Each structure stands twice: as structure tokens, then as C-alpha cells.
Image (cartoon, rainbow, N blue to C red):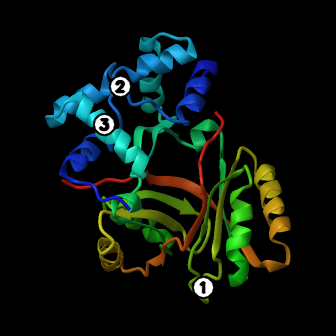
Amino acid sequence: MTAIDAIDRRIIQATQGGLPLLAQPYQAIAEQIGLTAAEVMQRMRAMQESGAIRRIGAVPNHYKLGYRYNGMTVWNIVDDKIDELGGKVGQLDFVSHCYHRPRHLPEWPYNLFAMVHSKTEQGVKEQIAVIAALLGEFNQGQDVLYSTRILKKTGLRIGS
Amino acid sequence: MDELDKIIINHLQDGFPICESPYAQVAEQLGIAESLLLQRLQALLDEGVLSRFGPLYHAEQMGGALSLAAVAAPAEDFEKIAEIVNSFPEVAHNYARNHRLNMWFVLATETPEQLPQTIARIEQQTGLKVYNMPKINEYYVGLRLQA
């Protein structure tokens, strides 16, 4: 964990909506917040190294790329097997995110979450079958929640 | 969306350089003019094919907190509840899902203390129980969709 300072905060606020589509975007950010381009680039590199910036890049809208089936697959896994099995599920090439999360019994018995994406319903079903086979007897129940609509997708926002 | 758009989207999901003229550098790698790259990126953003383009910040690595949370919004109040939930700047993403828990959102706060406070405020304003599901362990994160 790396705490960010006041200058980092200004950089984050200036870029959290996106990078300017200008030939020299870091220069443009620097001018906006009263720094030099060199300082902005040096601090952004440092934030990338510390993990504060996960990556710089494009975030596609799944639906617009034809990925209509975005399934949050959820599984009820025997507690002492979850790290081992979670690690294996996370390694599947079609799984984009994989987490151990708390159950909320009795309504929510699932503790392993794996996101899958496909252009067809059949594709998702096949992906789920692969995960189920991998989990085997340690899987005590499962469900899949498809996203039906994006209600918000802005990414992290920090206030001023 | 044509072939060039797909090449641009796939290339830019892998990262973007930090240097004086990064678009020129990427354009050169792709064998196109910088102005064409900028024009295409603007169009992809305008059309909503790209939700955003820029740095993706990680709340936890900055000393903050991140969680996934869900509510069961009654169908007749769904839009109103979505509006309330989305009005929180701490809500980074929000998706409608086909389950009794039909609204799932990611919360990102600058400090760990703000997370339970934000959840309490969402519960207060929506009148719904928020199911908080912060990660206990992360096994993989690497979203990349082939365009």
C-alpha cells in the first residue's frame, strides 16, 4: 500500500475521467495543474510501479464489442479448498476476474466469484461447465448472474 | 467498427506509454498516422465502444478501500434506486443483474473508514439492505476482451 500525496491527487483528479486526446497529453495535464510534463510523467510512472495505477489504456464496453453474455459465476466452495481452487479457476484463460468473497447466509451461500464473457449463451455455458468440472466435489452449489444493463461505469473517482 | 478500430482496441488494452508523444509512438507501432489514431480513439469514445481511455486507478493501492456490494431493488423502484446508488461518487461501476440481488456495484473509497460510511448512507437513502462483499482474496484480475 502506497499513500498518495497532494500532487498525486491533483494528477488523479485531472486524469480519472480519461487521458486528453492531444499529441502531448501529459504536457496538457501538467499545464492544467501547474506542474511540468516531466513531473507528471515521473509521478505517473511511480504510481504505475506502486500499483496505484493498474494500467493505462482502453476500457471497452463489453456489449459494444459483441460480448452480450457477461456472467458473474458464483460458487459455494468448501472453505479449506477455496485458495487452491480459486487459484486454478483464476488461471483459466476466459476468466477475467476471480475472487474469494464472504457469504451472506442464508440468502447468499456463494464464496467464489469468477467473471466470464462470451458472445453467445452457449459459450458461457461451456465456460461454466469447464469451471464446474475443475471444482468437482468441492463445489456445493452454483449460480450465474448475467449483467442485463450497465447502470454506471466511470471507474474510480476521488473528490477535490 | 472496422479492422483498424479492432486493432487499436486490442493494442490499447495492453497499456499505453508514458512519454512526451505517446500517441505518435503507438501510431508508429500500428503503422498509421498519429492524427488517424487520435481521430479513431475519439470516435470510439463518442460511440461508447470504449467506456474510457486513460489510467485505471486502484483504490486499495492508494490506501483506500474497494468492495463489491449488492441490493435487492424492488422492480417498481429500480430506476429510482439506480439513480440514488449512481449519485455516489464512491460507486465506480454499477450493473443490473438477473437475480433477486439485482443491482451490483463496485465501491471505491479513499480511506478504509469511508467504505462502511458510504454503505450506511446508501442503506439510509435507499431503505435497502446492502450486501457488502469485500474481497477476501484475489486470484486473478486481467480483463482483456478481443475486439
Q: Do the residues labelled 1 and 2 touch (CB within 8 Å)?
A: no
Question: Which residue corresponds to the image point at 59% horizontal and 82% vertical from the top-left?
Answer: A103
Identify which amino acid the numbered label 3 is placed on.
Answer: Gln
**Residues under labels 3 and 2: Cα distance?**
20 Å
Up-down relation of residue B129 to residue A129 (above or below): below
Tell us which disc is closer to us: 1 or 3.
Answer: 3
Residue nearest the viewer, comparing A31 with B74: A31
Question: Which residue corresponds to the image point at 74% horizontal and 54% vertical from the top-left?
Answer: A92
In the picture of the structure, the residue carrying the numbered disc 1 is: A107
Upstream in sequence: badge 3 or badge 2: 2
Please tell me how crowded label 3 is: few (under 14), some (14-19), or many (20+) other residues with Cα within 10 Å: some
- Do we see residue A143 in this rendering? no
Identify which amino acid the numbered label 1 is placed on.
Answer: Glu
Please tell me how crowded label 2 is: few (under 14), some (14-19), or many (20+) other residues with Cα within 10 Å: some
In the picture of the structure, the residue carrying the numbered disc 3 is: A42
Question: Which residue corresponds to the image point at 35% horizontal and 44% vertical from the top-left?
Answer: A46
In the picture of the structure, the residue carrying the numbered disc 2 is: A21
Please tell me how crowded label 1 is: few (under 14), some (14-19), or many (20+) other residues with Cα within 10 Å: few
Q: Mark 1 lies on which chain?
A: A
| Circles 1 and 3 on the same chain | yes
SS under mark 1: loop
Q: Where is residue A45 in the image (x, y as percent from the top left)?
A: 37, 39
Upstream in sequence: badge 1 or badge 3: 3
